[in-house]
Amino acid sequence: MSHHLFLLSPSDTPLYSLTHYSTKPVANVSSPLASNLPNWSTSAFAGTLTALSGASSSAQQTAGGAVRVGGGQDRHVIQMIANASLDVIEDLMKTQSTMFLKSVDKFNEWTVSAFITPGNMKFVLLHEGKNDDGIKSFFIDVWELYVKTMLNPFHTAHTPIRSTVFDTRVRASAKKHL
Amino acid sequence: MDTHAFASLAQVRVLLVPVGTVPQSSFDKYAAELRTFDAIRLGDIPADNKDEKARFMPNPLSTGYLHLSFPTHPPPFSHLPLSLLRPSNFPLAVIGLAACSKTDSLPSILDEFNASLLDIFPAGGMYPLAKNCFVFEEGEGNTNVNLGDSLPSLVVIPSMMGNKKLYIGTLLADLCSHVLGEFGTLVQGLESPAGNEHLNSALMPMLPPSDLPQPLDNGRKRDSLPPLPTHSSQPEMKAFNLASAASLKRNSSGSVFRQSTLNVPPPPKKRLSSIGVASSHGRLFKVLGDFYLLAGRTEDAAVWYNEALLLFKSSSDTVWQAATLEGMATVSIIDAWSAGQGLNTSTSALREPWSDVFDKLSQAITLYHRSPAVDGEHNYSLLSYLYSCAVLRQASLLFSVWSAKGWGPLAFSTMLQPGPTPYLPPTLSHQGLTSWATLERLSALSGISRSSISAVLAQVHGPWLLHLGARERISILENTASLYACLGYRRKEAYILREVLGCILDLIVCGREEDGFSRLSSVPLPPGLGIQGLNSSSSSQRGNVGVRFSENMDGNESVLKLLKYVCKVLGINLDAVRLLDNSGEGPPDEQSVAASIEDDIGTEFIEPYGWPELQVGVVREAVAVAEALPDFLAVAQFALSSLKTLQAVLAPGDQYHLYTTSNRALMTAHRRGDSKSVEYWSGKPLVSISLSSFPLVRLPIEKPLSALQSRPSDITPILTGGTDPFLYNPRRALGQGKSLVVQNELLEFVLVLRNPYVFDLEIQSLSLSTSGVTFDSKPVRVVLPSTSFHVVKLSGKATETGPLIVRGCFVQAPGGIKREFTLPLSTEEEEERVSRKRAALECEVGRSKYSGLDCFPWEKASKRTSTQLAVSTTKAPLRLLEYTVVPEQPLLRIRRTSVTHGAVMMYDGEMSTIRITLENVSPLPIDFLHLVFDDSTIAPAQQALANGDLSVFDTYETEYDLLHRPVFSWNKEDTKDIPPGHKLTININCYGKVGCTNGTIHMSYSYVHRPVASHDPAPQVFHTRQLSYPVMVTVYHMLECHGMDILPFPSYPLELDQEQIGTDDQCLGNETGWCLFSVEVRNTYGLPFEISFERIQQGKPRGLTSTIVSPGSTSRVVFPIKKFILSEAHVSQPIPTLSDRQFIVTKSKLSKAQERAQRELFWYREELFKNLRGHWREAGGTRSGDLSLRQQRMTLPMLETLRTETASIHMSLDRHEGSDENPVALHDGKYYPPSSEFVYLRTKVTNLSLTSLVFTLGFDFQSSPHIIFEGLLRDVPVGRLESGESRVVDTGLCFLAYGRYEISAEAKVVGSTESKGAGRLVATVRAEG
């Protein structure tokens, strides 16, 4: 089961992203409709379509049990989904005051949870299973780490986070909670 | 386009087909006319109560409606298996729309209609159940109207008909009645046990036409469908089918209980038992329900659906069960619509009124989703289709309620009749879609949050989309995208739109490939090329030649529009580089200039927006899409826009790829003769422009014409020099504002260009943009190396005189359009404005007030409220680089000089000559030549003068030095006109001056007296050019004068004089009035020099003395000079300044007397130097020069010596007054008077001064007691003496003893005690003999 975390600046630019593979198994509830997909075209555009519809990822999961590290799912599609889910997140953050928006959106097989900091930063997590408590504590950890990064006076809301300390700590927290 | 209206299950589809040559516009017009009939009252439908047909006929008094929809596209063939499961998916009736004029014959129209039906509907389908052809009459009268009546299934609608609408309504009702009748027939067939078995045989059963019970009377309608070209032959053909089918069916459907349930909903239980056969009747009941729903009888439909559901609960027929649930949901909405047309009040507070429908649909969706894929083949695509439709149905339920501000009539009618713009609900407008408040208001009113709609809608998306056929997929994705768009979820919309684009492009590409392939292999060449193909038997040789077929450009525009939209949502502005007409090279306007400056500042502080990886991906895709279309201009536009806007995030490889792609595309577009092209894109490449400076020789200098006239009061500029009392003089700077350039001479401009990209940027043409006088220059082609600044030199000539303004440069990328970039000079206010703006932006950067889609970079400026950043409209006009082009100028050069190695060696005070030969190398004559000199002594002297610390005396010395002893000088008379190609030699005098190390000869020349056209005003200025010739000067300081002194020259005995001076004695004598001038001259050089001093005193003989000074030795030169006196007026003049300097404040606080003394010293010294001239000559050589005494100072004793006394006193001794017989003996200037004898002392006082004075005389006898005298000794009055007058005073004396007596006399002016002249007399009295 994989998780994809993105820290997005107010202008939708990712400042940090993380892909985390947890050892927990995926509860596979795929529809019969999603199987036996045809290869109906070979053009490049069909490839785009296949990827965007989520077909490649599910096909890939059924084919090989172990998820390949780094490029199992189409990274571009994951990012597209994360970006698209911002619509809902922005919508909800205007009406709700909570920072943690759990399972705010679902797309293809992905569930999107989000966390909004008071500085309008959005943490977006794409996950497959249901793990609300873990995700919430993970988000709070990340937030704390982010706030510590922001203490740096040279760090603006648009500076990408390249600190290795931040990275290791987020990874550790992901391991712990996800 | 397939719409997914919520109530599509209840809508009878009537397919509209164009027949014959009806033009698109009129087809659309007629279709719109028909579409106004979206519902027909059941009461209006003529009932056909014949046997089984009457079953679905409406009750005569029923109040329901039959809902119609009018698609123009038939469903794809692949949907055929759905024909029983989802009858509403198919056109139940067909209407052909034809337009006829006089020439058309109706039978032929009918034939065409039938033929097109054969194309549209496959032979095996059950539908359509009814058909008709509407022929709209066009033009005036039509003779064929009568003929129309004779033809079945063809109605002519005359153009003259008054109430056309009513008529069409009636026709439609007829058609519907047919359809309802056919329902009855169909159901009759299905109700038979065999039919029921067939119904249950497969997941999606399809009745072959042969299985259907076909009443004979129906055959008339169906018989047009079989694929036979002629009308006449159809019946026979049909006969085969019908013969077998009809007989079979009629027997099997023997149970005729239909008649009893004609008008009343049949009690289901009864029928259940009566058809007791093997298979469950669930599906049959569901079909019945569907048909009742279509027929507008919702009560019946609900009853049958409930029955079906009961049966399905036990079995696991998920798909049919789900379809039943969908039907039931539709029933509720139709009921609500018909009940609540007017009011809607009874909403329970507990549950939302639509939750029941919603639940049913959710159930259906789950069922579809779980439906097992049983019997293989193409079920997946249909199941996915049903699933997606169900999801869309549910989403559109919520969406309709949401957009209609709640559960109410508006929501129902939205669901039933989406209207002409199904994707934009009436409560929203395009503007409203972007406003969050509008959307949120709808949510608040309806109680449905947008996220919940989105959550429902998201279910539609999944891998199963791949199962769908292209057409369904596009339709479903489009629908999804439009729903997202209406919800304001633009990113999701963009996501879906990318898929839509993928679908469309895939179809385009695949279609083209097939096409191309077929052309290559078998299809004959297009007619235009036919001859070639026929002539060459070996046509395979042509395989290599690419033949371009005219491409269909339709729709490209829309695809590109979609692309741009998607990119825009992701924060890329694909229109950043505009497409412009090739011809359009608009006049440069000031606005653009200002804008370009604004841009510059703006780009410095651009914030990153969006998701770089996504942006890069989507841009690549956009370029690929545009290439695939192909639309080459769009390719270039997209590629260049992304290069422009995404330069920061694009990887080098991408940048390079995009650049080459755009170049290629532009070349192709150009080759194909596109009239448009892209504007220049790569930001502002121009960094600076400057004129490479002229060599000094060519630089023209502007002079006022008045400078040529000699001014009477000539203040020598050399004294004032370049002195300016102010260290910073703003006026001086202003005067040099305009640079001068010369007409018809090559100007070279240096441009600095910038390339921020990783690839080498090619600029096809780079040229200067100038205004003012015409400027000839050729554009150049430049390649800017990657990520660097590049210097380009552009040269050209100004062909006229006048102002030349360099605005900037024109830049044109390959295949692009020329664009001007201006470069204004930075004026002060401009600088301030820019820095202000920069500061404001700096303050703003990094802060985010808006987030997400609200903060697109291109919207930022409009949302900014700070007025500081607003572009100020009232701006000072921009200043640009300006040059003044002056008329052609002659050119002079130095041909040769007499100076070797550019160096001159001189002794101090030596005078030598330099010869310089000038040549005029231009075609213009030179009629003005002026020389100005500079040397290294001038500047320090001028500096010293400017400082003003010098005393008056020193000032005079310095000025004298500058003015009268310049290092270089020339004779103005040497100049004359130099015609083209001629030479002129001029002599320049050099004077050796110690301390001079180098000097420069500046020659200004011009062509002043040009022929001027008579009507031109005489020019006020002329221009000169300057030649400079530097000279190294070495001056040896060899002779030093010092120790000047002036000594009195007493009246020595004459013989002494004779011994000393020799021949010159006659000028000496015993007279007073001479003094001795002496000076020491030291030779510090290695050669002996002969020095001589000359006396040139007026009225006196010239005198000369000379001596040789050997190296290292010092000689003293002594030389007598005549004393002189200067008049009081002369002496009392202040010390003059040679320059005309004013405001000289005497700093020295000298007393009157001191001042007077100083002036006397000054003037006497001047007079002395006038009268003396020193020379030197190289011993044994030819070189000679002046020896200057100006270093020498004069002291007061020297002055006293030099000045003639006021009075001269001559004393003599006479023996007796008036008698000269026995004079007193005089020997060697001494008198030998007798002792004890009276003699007279005769004292002659002469007034030597220039005024008349009153003198007194005083005698001094050394207090000798041995002299007795007569009269007074002190203050003997002499009286007034005029100038030059003398008077004698006699005094009687008697020497009483032998001895030597010395008598002196002193003249005094009355009133003063100082002596003005003295005389002395020595007398020796001795014994006689």
Image (cartoon, coloured by chain):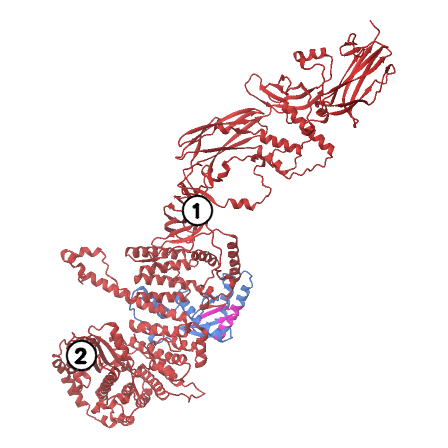
Chain colours: A blue, B red
Q: Quadrant of the N terminus of chain B?
A: bottom left
Q: Quadrant of the C terminus of chain B?
A: top right
- Quick one: B332 or B310, which is closer to the camera? B332
- The number of discs equals 2
List x then y, in percent, for residue B122: 21, 77
List x then y, in percent, for residue B780: 37, 47
Q: Quadrant of residue B301?
A: bottom left
Q: Is residue B609 magenta?
A: no
Q: Is residue A127 magenta?
A: yes
Sequence-wise, the earlier of marks 2 and 1 is 2
Question: Do we see residue B770 in this rendering?
Answer: yes
The segment highlighted magenta reads: A115-143
Q: Secondary structure at mark 1?
A: strand
Mark 2 vs mark 1: in front: 1
Q: Is residue B918 above or below residue B433?
A: above
Q: Amino acid at mark 2?
A: Leu
Q: Amino acid at mark 1?
A: Pro
Please rate how many residues cluster around mark 1, counting C-alpha atoms within 10 Å: few if below 14, some from 14 to 19, many from 20: some
Q: Which residue is mark 1?
A: B803
List x then y, in percent, for residue B974: 48, 28
Q: Which residue is mark 2?
A: B225
The subunit carrying tag 1 is: B
**Residue reaching furthest right?**
B1265
